[in-house]
Image (cartoon, rainbow, N blue to C red):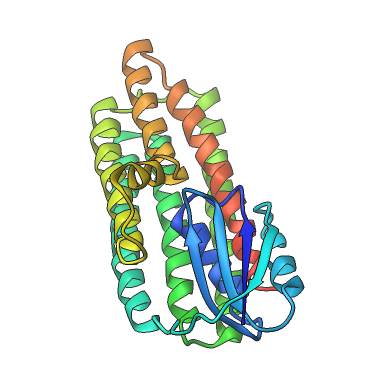
Amino acid sequence: MYKTIFNIPKMDCPSEENLIRMKLQGIPGIAGLDFDIPGRKLVVYHTGEATPIEKAIQELKLGGKQISSEETDRTGFDKSAHQKKLLWAVLSINFAFFGIEMGTGLISKSMGLVADSLDMLADSFVYGLSLFAVGGSLILKKRIAKIAGYFQITLAIIGFAEVLRRFFGTEQLPDFTTMVVVSVFALIANAICLYILQKSKSREEAHMKASMIFTSNDVIINLGVIIAGVLVHWLQSAQPDLIIGSIVFALVIRGAFRILKLGN
């Protein structure tokens, strides 16, 4: 058995962790995976060569690179039942907030909230796919990954079109109070998801947990929508909302292409 450590600079949230888990699922000889999101590191316990593992990680375009490999006598890696329980919890939270943000975004005319709802939906897809990956069919997982990826891209393109329409039109200002309040709750929801996924992996000190939370893309997006809401009110302009919406739609498309890579 070998213990191989990879540095993955662009791995900064649990949804990317699950993308990596799914990508590595079909590679024979992998016994266990340990993720260090704050440190951007992945430890793979495996038999045989590490080259196929490194190649699979690099296909996700997260900057993965092997930094060390050594023999180990560690055993006991079967945690699939516990993993499923955690995945169901974060899937439920993300999907619930997809509905909340989509609904309030449409009502308040905020493209930032609508875009963030699609980011929540994207995470829901990843966690849902991960549930199939835990003991599920690899072929079915690949098919669903393709459907989910193309669906995300379609929604994001529709979102971009709406941003352009509003930019050149005379739309009513978004309701900044709704933007800020809903985004604060979404931020809390993302922090809870991060805590749920990490609480059973290690007994990290408080500053490490804080570091993990505030380096997450999801939380940064929530903070961006909050700032955009404040700027909408301060400047009396819809442009901050349209800008943050465009940025998040771009991130959703980037995430969709990563999901599509799981279907290859």
> Does residue 116 lie above or below 48 as drawn?
above
Which is more toward the observer, 185 or 107? 185
Rendered image quadrant of residue 176: top left
* Quarter of the N terminus within the rendering: bottom right
Q: Position of residue 246 (x, y in %)?
A: 54, 35
Q: Residue at x 31, y 59 (%)?
A: 203
Q: Position of residue 179 (x, y in %)?
A: 30, 33
Q: Position of residue 153 (x, y in %)?
A: 59, 55
Q: Residue at x 27, y 53 (%)?
A: 192
Residue at the top extreme, as displayed: 235
> Does residue 76 lie above or below 192 as drawn?
below
* Residue 154, visible in the rendered structure: no
* Quarter of the C terminus within the rendering: bottom right
Q: Residue at x 37, y 18 (%)?
A: 231
Left or right position of 143 against 131: right
Which is more toward the observer, 127 or 27? 27
> Does residue 174 lie above or below 124 as drawn?
above
Left or right position of 172 against 21: left
Left or right position of 216 against 44: left
Left or right position of 133 against 108: right
Q: Residue at x 54, y 49 (%)?
A: 252
